[in-house]
Amino acid sequence: AQKITQTQPGMFVQEKEAVTLDCTYDTSDPSYGLFWYKQPSSGEMIFLIYQGSYDQQNATEGRYSLNFQKARKSANLVISASQLGDSAMYFCATLTDKLIFGTGTRLQVFP
Amino acid sequence: ETGVTQTPRHLVMGMTNKKSLKCEQHLGHNAMYWYKQSAKKPLELMFVYSLEERVENNSVPSRFSPECPNSSHLFLHLHTLQPEDSALYLCASSQGRTGTRSNEKLFFGSGTQLSVL
């Protein structure tokens, strides 16, 4: 069975600083995908970044990078140079035969 | 125009009402999904359609009835709901169905915020 855990219900970061959002997962399937989604107050879930279980390098997408530590089963999201528009809920998800989401972390960026 | 459009954005209904949620995707995808998002709970997968055929139903009560007339449209028909059904209902689509590839990316709509009185 898949399980995904986000232990930080809320995080604060000052504008232009970097922030790390934690995510750990558990799956017995050797092939899986890891995703991060952003959900602003408008409700839409916006895809941010993807990491495959066999990928050797950590994924990066602009200011987003995924710190993938396979042995520790962690897939933390790093946002560099935070912006006020980054304030939102962030969800980690894992995909084998189903896409399973964590409970999310609310990030608030302050000036 | 966004890739996945959901209407209405907000819906308030009584427990005896019948209403429908609509989802339309403009991405040429083959799979569509309904998710339920309740406060402080992970997103729950409700239904999956692949090429207009229902391939998954995650033990959802029969008061929720999905319909997929074609690969671009997905409906969720609601009947005699309960107050605990109040939630954000999100529609999503993907090129293929999740479970066929581990890198299948879902595209979501903005959701319908449903309140059941």
Image (spheres, helix red, strand yellow):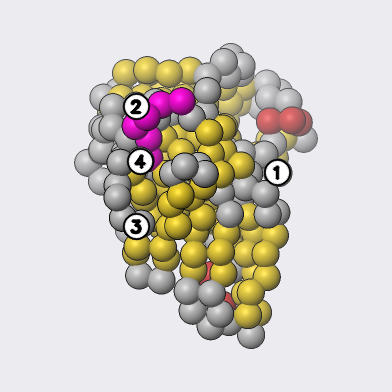
Q: Secondary structure at mark 2?
A: loop
Camera-near label (1 vs 2) is 2
CB atoms of marks 3 and 1 within 8 Å: no
Q: Are marks 1 and 4 on the same chain?
A: no
Q: Nearer the viewer, residue B32 or A62?
A: A62
**Label 3: chain?**
A
Q: What is the quadrant of residue B22 in the picture?
A: top left
CB atoms of marks 2 and 4 within 8 Å: no
Residue B100 belongs to the span the image colors magenta: no
Q: Are marks 4 and 3 on the same chain?
A: yes
**Label 1: chain?**
B
Q: Does any portion of residue A105 appear in the rendered image?
A: yes
Read off the magenta span.
Answer: A28-33
| Magenta stretch prevailing secondary structure | loop
Q: Amino acid at mark 2?
A: Gly
Residue plotted at (63% across, 74% down): A13
Q: Does any portion of residue B93 appear in the rendered image?
A: no
Q: Nearer the viewer, residue A77 or B48?
A: A77
Question: Would you place residue A87 above or below residue B93 in this image?
Answer: below
Camera-near label (3 vs 2) is 3
Which residue is denoted by mark 1 in the rendering?
B39
Q: Amino acid at mark 1?
A: Ala
Q: Nearer the viewer, residue A43 or A47?
A: A47
Question: Would you place residue A17 above or below residue B27 in this image?
Answer: below
Residue A86 % position (x, y): 53, 70
Q: Are marks 3 and 2 on the same chain?
A: no
**Real-space CA distance between mark 3 and mark 2, rounded to the nearest whole angstrom:** 21 Å
Q: Amino acid at mark 3?
A: Ala
**Real-space CA distance between mark 1 and mark 4, rounded to the nearest whole angstrom:** 30 Å
Q: Secondary structure at mark 1?
A: loop
**Label 4: chain?**
A
Residue A31 belongs to the span the image colors magenta: yes
